Protein backbone atom coordinates (compact mmCIF):
# COMPACT_ATOMS: atom_id res chain seq x y z
CA UNK A 1 0.00 0.00 0.00
CA UNK A 2 2.75 2.45 0.93
CA UNK A 3 4.39 1.96 -2.48
CA UNK A 4 1.07 2.57 -4.25
CA UNK A 5 0.42 5.76 -2.30
CA UNK A 6 3.93 7.04 -2.95
CA UNK A 7 3.58 6.18 -6.65
CA UNK A 8 0.33 8.16 -6.84
CA UNK A 9 1.89 11.11 -5.01
CA UNK A 10 4.85 10.90 -7.38
CA UNK A 11 2.56 10.87 -10.43
CA UNK A 12 0.43 13.79 -9.22
CA UNK A 13 3.46 15.82 -8.20
CA UNK A 14 5.01 15.20 -11.62
CA UNK A 15 1.94 16.61 -13.31
CA UNK A 16 1.93 19.63 -10.99
CA UNK A 17 5.62 20.19 -11.55
CA UNK A 18 5.38 19.97 -15.30
CA UNK A 19 2.56 22.48 -15.42
CA UNK A 20 4.16 25.01 -13.08
CA UNK A 21 7.93 24.69 -12.88
CA UNK A 22 9.29 23.53 -16.20
CA UNK A 23 11.23 26.24 -17.98
CA UNK A 24 10.76 25.93 -21.72
CA UNK A 25 14.23 27.40 -22.28
CA UNK A 26 15.93 24.60 -20.34
CA UNK A 27 17.00 21.39 -21.99
CA UNK A 28 15.00 18.22 -21.53
CA UNK A 29 17.69 16.86 -19.22
CA UNK A 30 17.67 20.00 -17.05
CA UNK A 31 13.89 19.86 -16.72
CA UNK A 32 13.98 16.15 -15.95
CA UNK A 33 16.53 16.73 -13.18
CA UNK A 34 14.38 19.53 -11.70
CA UNK A 35 11.34 17.27 -11.83
CA UNK A 36 13.19 14.43 -10.09
CA UNK A 37 14.35 16.80 -7.32
CA UNK A 38 10.82 18.14 -6.89
CA UNK A 39 9.33 14.63 -6.76
CA UNK A 40 11.88 13.62 -4.13
CA UNK A 41 10.91 16.63 -1.97
CA UNK A 42 7.21 15.80 -2.30
CA UNK A 43 7.70 12.15 -1.33
CA UNK A 44 9.94 13.07 1.62
CA UNK A 45 7.35 15.57 2.90
CA UNK A 46 4.52 13.08 2.43
CA UNK A 47 6.49 10.53 4.49
CA UNK A 48 7.13 13.11 7.25
CA UNK A 49 3.46 14.10 7.27
CA UNK A 50 2.33 10.48 7.52
CA UNK A 51 4.64 9.89 10.48
CA UNK A 52 3.20 12.98 12.22
CA UNK A 53 -0.36 11.87 11.50
CA UNK A 54 0.17 8.34 12.83
CA UNK A 55 1.72 9.79 16.02
CA UNK A 56 -1.14 12.29 16.40
CA UNK A 57 -3.74 9.54 16.03
CA UNK A 58 -1.98 7.34 18.59
CA UNK A 59 -1.35 10.18 21.07
CA UNK A 60 -4.99 11.28 20.78
CA UNK A 61 -6.33 7.70 21.12
CA UNK A 62 -8.29 8.12 17.89
CA UNK A 63 -9.60 5.30 15.73
CA UNK A 64 -9.03 6.49 12.19
CA UNK A 65 -9.14 4.81 8.83
CA UNK A 66 -6.64 5.35 6.07
CA UNK A 67 -7.60 5.68 2.44
CA UNK A 68 -5.17 3.15 0.99
CA UNK A 69 -5.33 4.64 -2.49
CA UNK A 70 -4.29 8.14 -1.46
CA UNK A 71 -2.84 7.95 2.05
CA UNK A 72 -5.06 10.39 3.93
CA UNK A 73 -6.75 9.55 7.24
CA UNK A 74 -10.36 10.03 8.24
CA UNK A 75 -12.91 9.33 10.95
CA UNK A 76 -16.56 9.05 9.98
CA UNK A 77 -18.48 10.37 12.99
CA UNK A 78 -21.85 10.00 11.26
CA UNK A 79 -22.26 8.46 7.78
CA UNK A 80 -25.29 10.55 6.76
CA UNK A 81 -27.67 9.62 3.98
CA UNK A 82 -27.04 7.05 1.26
CA UNK A 83 -26.57 9.79 -1.36
CA UNK A 84 -23.01 11.08 -1.48
CA UNK A 85 -21.56 14.10 -3.28
CA UNK A 86 -19.16 13.85 -6.19
CA UNK A 87 -16.37 16.24 -7.06
CA UNK A 88 -18.79 18.05 -9.37
CA UNK A 89 -21.30 18.63 -6.54
CA UNK A 90 -22.00 21.97 -4.93
CA UNK A 91 -21.78 21.40 -1.16
CA UNK A 92 -23.07 23.25 1.88
CA UNK A 93 -21.07 22.53 5.05
CA UNK A 94 -20.19 23.52 8.58
CA UNK A 95 -16.53 22.97 9.39
CA UNK A 96 -13.55 23.67 11.56
CA UNK A 97 -9.97 23.52 10.30
CA UNK A 98 -6.98 23.29 12.61
CA UNK A 99 -3.33 22.28 12.79
CA UNK A 100 -1.92 19.29 14.68
CA UNK A 101 -1.12 21.57 17.63
CA UNK A 102 -4.81 22.52 17.92
CA UNK A 103 -4.51 26.01 16.41
CA UNK A 104 -7.79 26.74 14.61
CA UNK A 105 -7.15 28.52 11.32
CA UNK A 106 -10.74 28.75 10.12
CA UNK A 107 -14.27 27.65 10.97
CA UNK A 108 -17.82 28.47 10.12
CA UNK A 109 -19.49 30.70 12.64
CA UNK A 110 -22.18 29.28 14.90
CA UNK A 111 -25.50 28.76 13.10
CA UNK A 112 -23.97 29.49 9.69
CA UNK A 113 -22.82 27.38 6.78
CA UNK A 114 -20.58 27.89 3.79
CA UNK A 115 -21.10 26.65 0.25
CA UNK A 116 -18.80 25.91 -2.67
CA UNK A 117 -18.34 23.68 -5.64
CA UNK A 118 -16.38 20.71 -4.30
CA UNK A 119 -14.05 20.74 -7.30
CA UNK A 120 -12.80 24.21 -6.26
CA UNK A 121 -11.73 23.08 -2.78
CA UNK A 122 -8.49 21.45 -1.67
CA UNK A 123 -7.95 17.93 -2.94
CA UNK A 124 -8.31 16.44 0.56
CA UNK A 125 -11.91 17.64 0.67
CA UNK A 126 -12.51 16.36 -2.87
CA UNK A 127 -11.30 12.92 -1.78
CA UNK A 128 -12.85 12.83 1.69
CA UNK A 129 -16.25 14.50 1.49
CA UNK A 130 -17.71 11.89 -0.89
CA UNK A 131 -17.25 9.32 1.91
CA UNK A 132 -20.33 10.72 3.70
CA UNK A 133 -23.87 11.67 2.77
CA UNK A 134 -26.17 14.53 3.69
CA UNK A 135 -26.12 15.23 7.44
CA UNK A 136 -22.94 13.16 7.74
CA UNK A 137 -19.92 14.19 9.80
CA UNK A 138 -16.30 13.39 9.02
CA UNK A 139 -12.89 14.33 10.35
CA UNK A 140 -10.19 14.50 7.70
CA UNK A 141 -6.53 14.35 8.73
CA UNK A 142 -4.65 15.45 5.66
CA UNK A 143 -0.99 15.34 4.70
CA UNK A 144 0.10 18.75 3.42
CA UNK A 145 0.06 17.39 -0.14
CA UNK A 146 -3.76 17.16 -0.01
CA UNK A 147 -4.14 20.52 1.75
CA UNK A 148 -2.03 23.61 1.16
CA UNK A 149 1.26 22.01 0.12
CA UNK A 150 4.70 23.58 0.19
CA UNK A 151 3.55 27.20 0.43
CA UNK A 152 2.28 29.27 3.32
CA UNK A 153 -1.44 29.93 3.00
CA UNK A 154 -2.77 32.74 5.17
CA UNK A 155 -2.06 31.58 8.77
CA UNK A 156 -1.19 28.01 7.70
CA UNK A 157 2.55 27.37 7.49
CA UNK A 158 3.97 25.53 4.48
CA UNK A 159 4.01 21.71 4.73
CA UNK A 160 1.36 21.63 7.46
CA UNK A 161 -0.74 18.60 8.23
CA UNK A 162 -4.29 19.89 8.67
CA UNK A 163 -7.41 18.51 10.29
CA UNK A 164 -10.94 19.34 9.22
CA UNK A 165 -14.11 18.46 11.13
CA UNK A 166 -16.85 18.69 8.51
CA UNK A 167 -20.62 18.35 8.63
CA UNK A 168 -22.23 17.98 5.20
CA UNK A 169 -25.50 19.90 5.38
CA UNK A 170 -26.56 19.37 1.78
CA UNK A 171 -25.34 19.08 -1.78
CA UNK A 172 -26.60 19.18 -5.34
Image (tube, grey):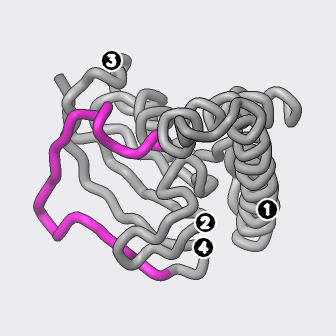
Label whose residue precedes the other's in the sequence (1 or 2): 1
The span from disc 4 to disc 3 (Cα, nearest Å) is 31 Å
Instruction: Give left or right: position of 172 versus 26.
Output: left
Magenta stretch contains residue 135: no
Question: Which residue is rendered at x = 37% and y = 32% of the image?
Answer: 80
Q: Name the residue that disc number 3 marks.
A: 83
Query: In this rendering, which labeled residue sits more in front, label 4 or label 1?
Result: 1
Instruction: Give left or right: position of 79 versus 5.
Output: left
Magenta stretch contains residue 108: yes
Q: Quadrant of residue 55?
A: bottom right
Query: In this rendering, which labeled residue sits more in front, label 4 or label 2?
Result: 2
Q: Which mark is residue 159?
A: 2
Mark 4 Cα-neighbour bin, 10 Å: few <14, some 14–19, many ≥20: some
Q: Position of residue 41 (x, y in %)?
A: 75, 55
Label 4 SS: loop
Question: Which residue is rendered at x = 59% and y = 50% of the image?
Answer: 145
The span from disc 4 to disc 2 (Cα, nearest Å) is 12 Å
Q: Name the residue that disc number 1 marks.
A: 48
Label whose residue precedes the other's in the sequence (2 or 3): 3
Which range of residues does the magenta coloring cover? 103-124
Q: Quadrant of residue 31?
A: top right
- The quarter of the image holding the C terminus is top left
Q: Circles 4 and 1: CB distance less than 8 Å?
A: no
Amino acid sequence: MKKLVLALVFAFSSMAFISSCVNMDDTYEENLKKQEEYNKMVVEQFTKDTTLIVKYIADSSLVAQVDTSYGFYYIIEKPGSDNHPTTSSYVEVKYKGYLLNGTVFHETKENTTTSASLNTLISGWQLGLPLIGTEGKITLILPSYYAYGMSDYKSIPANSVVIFEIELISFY
